[in-house]
Structures are given as structure tokens and as C-alpha cells.
Image (cartoon, grey):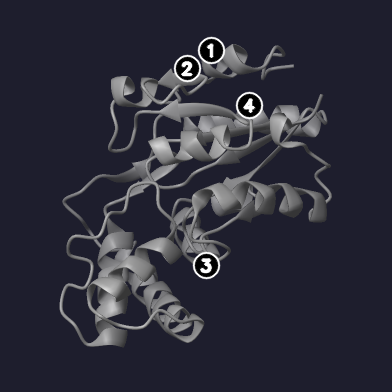
């Protein structure tokens, strides 16, 4: 059985010192000419499309594809600068991530898994964030916040992206989603996929455990134990 492994980005793979929040706030201000347009808008586990939609509604602006495109363009400009800027907030590759990706690369070379992204980030935003940490090259395909507002809708997009990349054909039950929020677990459960929840974002082990995730870990340092709790073959095979 071949498994499709899909990673979230923020709070799961990396922390960017809140560069995305600052960049999106600036982008919306540029386009809408309203200060602090993200005030009161929820972020955790949501897609960039959904966040921008809420922000535009909150300030009384019309949501359209043209408006989304304008905000996305400005956001990516600001993000490229913000991700390099010093920040009082943590900015790092999260514990265990590099080792987990290395272990999965061994499985991928053996034809056991395919590894991609399932993230609320716009594709270009994901590239900027992961590129800053030299992680973008580790992923050949994914589903991104450009595609849908609802994170649940990204699972079929990721499966299709894997097929188009030549990584294989997968049913939802062949998918494992790794993320740091209840929304990551929910989108897995909505399709009958497996979920590994990691408490390196804003939610505790207890809060993530309450979601019914298949595995909940403090971080990805003990990747072998997390993986073996979900699938029977070892990541070192």
C-alpha cells in the first residue's frame, strides 16, 4: 500500500515569526486603504482565501476574484520582505521536521509514500515561507489556499496534484494529513483520511487529542513512533 503524506506549513513545519500575518495585514491595507484590516479575523487552520474573504467582509469591501488577486500580489511582495525581517516571535524549522522529511524521503525512494503539502497558504506564499528555510525543494506538489476557502476541499485537490505529478493514484483512505490545528484533523476526518496532530502551533496536546486525531504528539521529534502508530511499516525500511 502506498501512502500520500500531506503536511501543513505554519506551526507544523516552520514558524515564520508571524511574517504572514504582518504581510497580509499590509497587503489588505494597500488594496483597501483601511488600517489594520485583519483586526478580529481568525487565522488558525484557515486558508488565505477564507481569511481575506472575512477581512473584506469585515471592512465592508466586496469579495471578488479581482480583489483576491490584488491582495495576493501585494501579500507576496510584503511576505518576501517580512520573512527575512528580525522578529520577537519564534522563527525556525520546528523540532523533528528535518528528520521526519529525511525518513519519508527514504520511504518515497522505495515507492512506499508520496509526500506533498496541504496548506491554507497561497502557493506563492508557501514557496516564499518554505524557501526561506530551504524546505520548498522537499515538496513536488500540493494543495494550496488559492484553490478553495474551505480546507476540507483541499484533500481532493492534493490527491489530484499527486496524480498529475506522477506520484501515484490515491484514495482518501490512503492519505495521512499532518497539521497543528483542529482544522487539519477535521479535513482529514471529513474524507476518511488519517490525521497526525502536532502541538507545535497554538493548540495543546489535550486540545488536539479532543479532536479524535489518530495520533497526537508534542512535536515531530519522535517521528518513528508517530508514524508507526498510524502505518505498519517503519520509516527506515
Determine contact: label 3, label 2, CB under 8 Å. no
| One can see residue 140 in this view | no
Location of residue 182 by image quarter: top left
For disc 4, the neighbor class at 10 Å (few under 14, some 14 to 19, many from 20) is some
Q: Secondary structure at mark 1?
A: helix
What residue is disc 4 on?
A: 103
Q: Earlier in the sequence, mark 4 or mark 3?
A: 4
Q: Secondary structure at mark 4?
A: helix
Q: Earlier in the sequence, mark 3 or mark 1?
A: 3
For disc 3, the neighbor class at 10 Å (few under 14, some 14 to 19, many from 20) is some
How far across and down, in percent of the image, does residue 82 sit? 30, 66
Determine contact: label 1, label 2, CB under 8 Å. yes
| One can see residue 201 in this view | yes
Q: Is residue 176 left or right of residue 39?
A: right
Rendered residue at 25%/60% (across/down): 41
Q: Nearer the viewer, residue 24 or 174?
A: 174
What residue is disc 3 on?
A: 124
What residue is disc 1 on?
A: 225
Rendered residue at 47%/58% (across/down): 121
Q: Nearer the viewer, residue 143 or 188?
A: 188
Amino acid at each position: 500500500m502506498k501512502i500520500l503524506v500531506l503536511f501543513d506549513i505554519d506551526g507544523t513545519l516552520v514558524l515564520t515569526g508571524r511574517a504572514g500575518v504582518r504581510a497580509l495585514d499590509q497587503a489588505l491595507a494597500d488594496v483597501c486603504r483601511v488600517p489594520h484590516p485583519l483586526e478580529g479575523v481568525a487565522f488558525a487552520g484557515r486558508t488565505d482565501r477564507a481569511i481575506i474573504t472575512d477581512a473584506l467582509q469585515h471592512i465592508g469591501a466586496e469579495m471578488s476574484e479581482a480583489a483576491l488577486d490584488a491582495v495576493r500580489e501585494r501579500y507576496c511582495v510584503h511576505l518576501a520582505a517580512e520573512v527575512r525581517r528580525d522578529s520577537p516571535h519564534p522563527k525556525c524549522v520546528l523540532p523533528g521536521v528535518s528528520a521526519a522529511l529525511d525518513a519519508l524521503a527514504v520511504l518515497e525512494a522505495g515507492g512506499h509514500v508520496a509526500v506533498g503539502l496541504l496548506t491554507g497558504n497561497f502557493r506563492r506564499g508557501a514557496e516564499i515561507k518554505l524557501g526561506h528555510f530551504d524546505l520548498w525543494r522537499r515538496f513536488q506538489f500540493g494543495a494550496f489556499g488559492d484553490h478553495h476557502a474551505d480546507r476540507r476541499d483541499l484533500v481532493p485537490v492534493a490527491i489530484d496534484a499527486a496524480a498529475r505529478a506522477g506520484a501515484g493514484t490515491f484514495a482518501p483512505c490512503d492519505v495521512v494529513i499532518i497539521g497543528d490545528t483542529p482544522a487539519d484533523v477535521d479535513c482529514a476526518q471529513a474524507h476518511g483520511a488519517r490525521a497526525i496532530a502536532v502541538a507545535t502551533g497554538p493548540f495543546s496536546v489535550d486540545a488536539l487529542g479532543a479532536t479524535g486525531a489518530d495520533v497526537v504528539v508534542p512535536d515531530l521529534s519522535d517521528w518513528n513512533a508517530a508514524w508507526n502508530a498510524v502505518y505498519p511499516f517503519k520509516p527506515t525500511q
